[in-house]
Image (spheres, coloured by chain):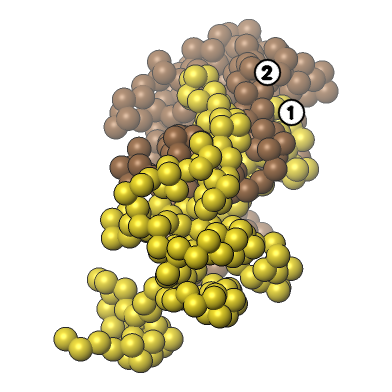
Chain colours: A brown, B yellow
Amino acid sequence: MPEQLGAAPAPVAKLIDAFHKLPGIGPKSAQRLTYHMLRIPPEEALALAQAIIELKEKTVLCSVCQNVTESDPCNICRDDARDRAVICVVEEPLDILAVERTRGFHGLYHVLHGVISPMDGVGPEDLKVNELLTRLRGGSVTEVIMATNPNLEGEATSMYISRLLTPMGIRVTRLARGLPMGSDLEYADEVTLSRALENRQDV
Amino acid sequence: MPEQLGAAPAPVAKLIDAFHKLPGIGPKSAQRLTYHMLRIPPEEALALAQAIIELKEKTVLCSVCQNVTESDPCNICRDDARDRAVICVVEEPLDILAVERTRGFHGLYHVLHGVISPMDGVGPEDLKVNELLTRLRGGSVTEVIMATNPNLEGEATSMYISRLLTPMGIRVTRLARGLPMGSDLEYADEVTLSRALENRQDV
């Protein structure tokens, strides 16, 4: 707790401190958020507190796909309309929301809950890789789409997992790299542009 | 709630929504914060929820200075070592922390809880102006320092209150305007620089 908060009442200092611990919230934002909580009606503030409590009390990880869910197995894993032969592997539960928004994928998911990152001491054993292998041993999955983030850790994780899956006779694909829609060639970074060139397609 | 959150479990969507309502938290930040809450241990998440609840349950406004406090009157108003002849008027409780940090002010405070802003429909009757006048009627206060923010609304509010106080024979002062310490003349905005010129001081 910054010492200059000595003049603030304990509950104020405590909440500033708690907000400050959140990612991307600096000391000034933490003060601003706390002051906002002071001003709003109690029921609005308590709604946020209640939402946090319910998030922890009412959600579990789906035992199949490891996504966050209220009921195990999750809605997607239980949905008979979905294609059980394709699994899209993502880093985080929020990535599923992003893919679902496209309305272009109708298979199942698998959440790794992180990426391999030796710098942060995260190895494959810290991820839900074994859970993925167990699912694939059933033999009904024909394709795994690696939808990790297009950065160093994401690519390395994707590479690691595809090496495990290829001997199992499963087709492993990954999301295309190229120019994002609505972007400007002039401002594209070199890596993106060279990937877009390499993977150029017939019109 | 953005419709694309349909795929998220209700407690997740609800918390994203609650975070999104906070000032300065966009939809992406709200998702990131919610996902962070999913990952951290329950006791850490509950600490934030508890801090919010306690902020609302354990704090009141000081009946004298209108600052946020655990006990009424607040520590500053109760402190016999402070100069009761000088009152520093601020917009928000957090401004008191800023002034206290200077360790250069030993008088009392008065929190207006806002500024006069016709655009937002905020008039003097929405601020703690009457409470200030009541305090001053005791006759023991000789100086009121207007420490509102140096912007349009702050200056207008300061002007409005000083017009009420001057006839009462109270000296009304305001914080000096000028170049901030550590700044660069080259990058100073015109208004700040012209104020600094007008209020130039003998070396």
Q: Are marks 1 and 2 on the same chain?
A: no
Q: Is residue B113 left or right of residue B184?
A: right
Q: Taking B30 as reference, is B175 above or below it?
A: below
Q: Which residue is mark 2?
A: A58
| Chain of the residue where label 2 is placed in the rendered structure | A
Q: Which residue is mark 1?
A: B10
Q: Residue B22's x, y, as percent?
A: 62, 47
- Quick check: marks 1 and 2 in contact, CB under 8 Å? yes
The quarter of the picture where residue A63 lies is top right
Q: Point out the residue furthest to the right here.
A: A81
User: Tag 1: residue type?
Assistant: Ala
- How many numbered tags mark residues here? 2
| Chain of the residue where label 1 is placed in the rendered structure | B
Q: Point out the residue furthest to the left here.
A: B203
Q: Is residue B33 visible?
A: no
Q: Residue at x 36, y 21 (%)?
A: A123
Q: Residue at x 66, y 29 (%)?
A: A51
Q: Residue at x 53, y 40 (%)?
A: B72
Q: Residue A96's x, y, as percent?
A: 64, 33
Q: Residue at x 40, y 15 (%)?
A: A125
Few, some or many residues within 10 Å of mark 1 (<14, 14–19, 20+): some
